[in-house]
Amino acid sequence: MANLLFSHIALSCADPVRTERFYSAHFGFRRARVVPLGGDNEIVFLKNDQSVYLELFRADAELPNLPAPAGDGPHYPGVRHLAFQVTDVGAAVQALGDAAEITLGPLDFSDFIPGWKTVWLKDPDGNIVEISQGYTDQDA
């Protein structure tokens, strides 16, 4: 496909305001657009400085009877986790403070890529979010 650009990740949220606050406060997202759906329901698009978008919907169904995501995310088919790169995982976790409900790590993967460190945590809706430093692509 010519000129293909990544568009967004859509999240169904139990409390979209709480989810927006989490991604705005800790990952640099800001409101890019609000689409009113009637009443007090709306879709909120969040954008960060790298033009990554999150589309927040209010959940309108109960969570199915699946195991709660843990560790680095669910291992059944579906989205395993969202991931963000930072310069210092430890500083990022410290900045998150009480909002950092860590599910796995921090782990050091320097045996694979020198300086690669990662931690996984939950967002307000229980989605797993990876925060990583030091990842680099493999040489061609």
Image (cartoon, rainbow, N blue to C red):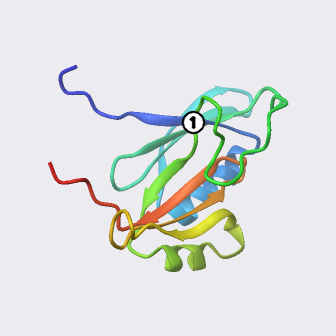
81 or 96, which lies in front? 81
- Image quadrant of residue 32? top left
Q: Amino acid at mark 1?
A: Val
Q: Position of residue 27 (x, y in %)?
A: 50, 61
Q: Position of residue 139 (x, y in %)?
A: 17, 54
The answer to whether 33 appears left or right of 22 in the picture is left
Q: Residue furthest left?
A: 140
- Image quadrant of residue 71? bottom right
Above or below 34: residue 19: below
Q: Look at 28% across and 33% down and name the residue there.
A: 5
Q: Look at 52% across and 78% down and name the residue there.
A: 90
Q: Tell me how many marks there are.
A: 1
Q: Residue furthest top?
A: 1
The answer to whether 91 appears left or right of 86 in the picture is right
Q: Which residue is mark 1?
A: 79
Above or below 124: residue 78: above
11 or 121, which lies in front? 121
Q: Residue furthest front?
A: 111
Q: Position of residue 98 (x, y in %)?
A: 72, 73
Above or below 14: residue 78: above
Above or below 73: residue 11: above
Q: Position of residue 97 (x, y in %)?
A: 66, 76
Q: Look at 59% across and 79% down and name the residue there.
A: 94
32 or 112, which lies in front? 112
Q: Where the N terminus falls, by quadrant?
A: top left
Q: Secondary structure at mark 1?
A: loop
Q: Look at 66% across and 41% down and name the residue there.
A: 74
User: What is the crowding at mark 1: few (fewer than 14 residues within 10 Å), some, or many (at least 20)?
Assistant: few
